[in-house]
Amino acid sequence: MGKTELFLTIILFNLFFVFFIVAVMIYIRKYQQRKKEYLNEIEINNEIHQKELLATQLEIQQATMQQIGRELHDNIGQKLTLVSLYTQQMLYENKVPEASERIEQVSQIINQSLQDLRSLSKTLTDDNINQKEIVTLIQEEVDNTNSFKKCKIIFEHNFNQLDLSFVHKNVLLRIIQEFIQNSIKHSQCKNIYIRLDTSEDLLWELEITDDGIGFDTSKTLNNGIGLTNMKNRAKIINADFTIESEKNKGTQVKITLKKHS
């Protein structure tokens, strides 16, 4: 073999080796790209599945609430109405003046219980959420909680009317309820501030803050059922969820929904 042939052989071998390396690199790159696309597809499918699961849970919750509301109204409500009629009859037929006052007290308690039961039944059904504005629903929740005088709640908003679907109103209301319950139970707060705003870019932004003892979010986010419930409800409608808290500096939750979501 001459020097020229040996030189060409070496060049061809080097070229083949380079092509081989390049081919291997291209294969690895394409493999990684396909793997990344596959993992992204799995993640997207998981997110879709999770949202469908959350939506199904919400539907089941709504159906359960409707059933409980109907049972309260049709069953227990009718029995309380019957008892109320009996007490009225006892008052009419009573011939012992000393007993009239106590019968009247019993009658008032029954009638108040009946009124509370009807209000609860109405709250548990879809009609209450469908027929009322979100501001009214939140204000009712605030007024009910303030009546217990455990923590003062202040609600503010920058609009008069906001056209929201049942799901959006339900999610907002349940998140607010969850936050209030957590704050009263765990934070030792004196005040809770709720603000619901809308703007050109945002369909709405809900901000809830308490002045309680706060907590370490890194230790609680993965285990706190209440926080998990709020995050999952925000996911149902593709809203952004953030939480900030420091010890002795209170807690703030912000849920934002952009108009293109």
Image: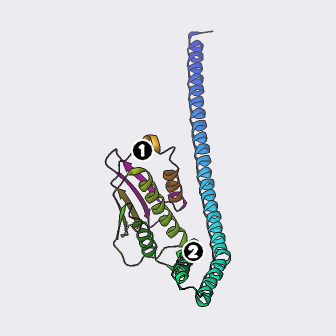
Kind of residue indicated by mark 2: Leu
Judging by the rendered image, the residue that carries numbered circle 1 is 217
Judging by the rendered image, the residue that carries numbered circle 2 is 117
- Placement of 8 over or under 99, stated as above or below: above
Q: Which one is nearer the viewer's eye here, 113 or 214? A: 113
Expressed as whole percent of the image width and height from the top left, the position of residue 5 reads 60, 14
Proximity of marks 1 and 2: CB atoms separated by less than 8 Å: no
Residue found at x 63% / y 78%: 80
Question: Magenta part of the protein: which range?
Answer: 234-261
Residue 130's disc is none
> Secondary structure under badge 1?
helix
- Placement of 255 over or under 42, stated as above or below: below
Q: CA distance from mark 1 to mark 2?
A: 38 Å
Residue 48, picture quadrant: bottom right
Instruction: Determine whether, in the image, residue 116 is placed left or right of residue 162.
Output: right
Residue found at x 66% / y 78%: 79
Q: Which one is nearer the viewer's eye here, 204 or 260? A: 204
Residue farthest left in this picture: 249
